[in-house]
Image (cartoon, grey):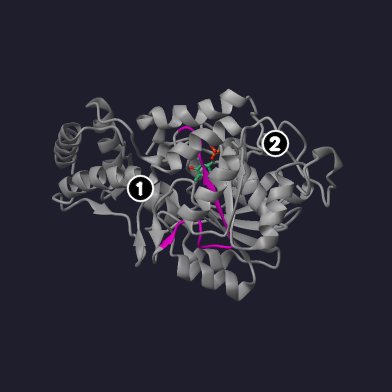
Amino acid sequence: MPGFELFSDLERKEVNDVLDNGVLMRYGFDGMRNGHWKARELEFELSESFGSKHVQLVSSGTAAVSVALAAAGVGAGDEVIMPTFTFVASFEAIMMLGAIPVLVDIDDTLTLDPKAVETAITDKTKAVMVVQMCGSMGNMDALSDICRKHNLIFIEDACQAIGGTYKGKPLGSIADLGCFSFDFVKTITCGEGGAVVTNNIDYYRNADHFSDHGHDHIGSDRGAETHPFLGYNFRISELHAAVGLAQVRRLPEFIAIQKKNYTILRDALSEIPEVTFRTVPKGGEESYAFLNFFLPDLETARKVSTGFKENGVDVCWNYYDNNWHYIRKWNHFKDLKSLYPISPEVKNGLEYLKTKSFEQSDHFIGRNISCLIKLSWTEEEIRDRAAKMKKIIQGLV
Ligand SMILES: *Cc1c(COP(=O)(O)O)cnc(C)c1O
């Protein structure tokens, strides 16, 4: 997955364009910048790549989720449904706006279970956020239908599934608003960066203004711009956008490499009857950024995970015991360890976390192993890795 593995002269050239004229900011300084508008160009390229009419670059994927929610009017006291298996950014972004994260179970897609979503809807629910974890996706038709039926905003976090598709549409472009991260370990990277994509002009305009202090971006004098509403600073810099511009042009190449490497590993593990794979919804094609498989039970998955570590098979995780991606170890969230007071509304809204258990999620995450697919492996390295993984698993099942 990490696009940084294949950094080349293409990235260096784009960055040098920016350094040569010295304009590190994406707005203004028209005379100085010698025609270089890296953030603007990257927005155009992303719009082409992801088939979305509008793209707003921001400073991170976490910022993208916050800006997407704000652009759609999610705020104080609103409930946002999100999965138990995701990155901490999901609840951080929701809570930044004073809204309440409502966590629900995942299914064998490793993303939101539509049935769990429907059960969790209350009169406070404002949005549903699907997180396309580890290169694949949720059942987008079922989730879209639920959102339409209940008049909810549908948000798609595609940070980990850049380049995957559902029924021919790029992941990130299917819901009302999509979010991408271009942090250092994502399939295409800016170092730090993110994007909100949408076909809705109002959401786009809101995201554009909100991510730059509410500036209306009319005319060419920043000092004279008006502020139709309150905003914040989630801007990306030209240097970061320059790196992303070189990377996005290489996305088809990166996806092809991921697919090739993924297929070699998958074919090897497919020969083990006890190994099964995550369900990819009908019409979906993964980005091949990760290979996810299930073992018969938690105990076997833990043993395999340890076996991998002891035998030098890196970048594979059993997320059940991981601090970053699964509810089980998010004690700072469950205990509301905050530097500043949290509103009573959010506090009350999160009471359920003290008692609620997520057996269905445990059932899938406990048995799952998720392996990152690297871009820089040689074919020999992948074949060795595949043989090693197969041998370790066969010795433990
Ligand atoms: C990486 C990631 C984010 C956040 O991205 P940053 O750019 O690191 O803030 C959000 N959601 C998911 C699923 C991610 O993997």
Task: Give the number of the mark in front: 1 or 2.
Answer: 2
Q: Position of residue 381 (x, y in %)?
A: 19, 31
The count of marks equals 2
Tell me where residue 383 sits by quadrant. Answer: top left
Left or right of residue 311, residue 96 in this image:
right
Q: Is residue 139 something one can see in this rendering?
A: yes
Q: Position of residue 359 (x, y in %)?
A: 44, 54
User: Is ligand 1 less than 8 Å from the beta carbon at label 1?
Assistant: no
Tell me where residue 3 sits by quadrant. Answer: top left
Left or right of residue 65, residue 222 in this image:
right
Q: Which residue is drawn at 49% across and 51% down?
A: 158
Query: SS for tag 1?
Result: helix
* Residue placed most toward the observer, 54 or 305: 54
**Which stretch appears magenta?**
169-184
Specify the label residue 252 is tagged with. 1
Q: Is residue 55 above or below residue 372?
A: below
Q: Is residue 369 something one can see in this rendering?
A: no
* Residue placed most toward the observer, 127 or 26: 26
Q: Where is residue 210 in the image (x, y as percent from the top left)?
A: 73, 47
Specify the label residue 190 is tagged with. none
Image quarter in which the N terminus is found: top left
* Residue placed most toward the observer, 325 or 198: 198
* Callout 2 amino acid: Asp
Residue 47: say if magenta. no
Disc 2 designates what residue?
Answer: 30
Q: Position of residue 264 (x, y in %)?
A: 19, 45
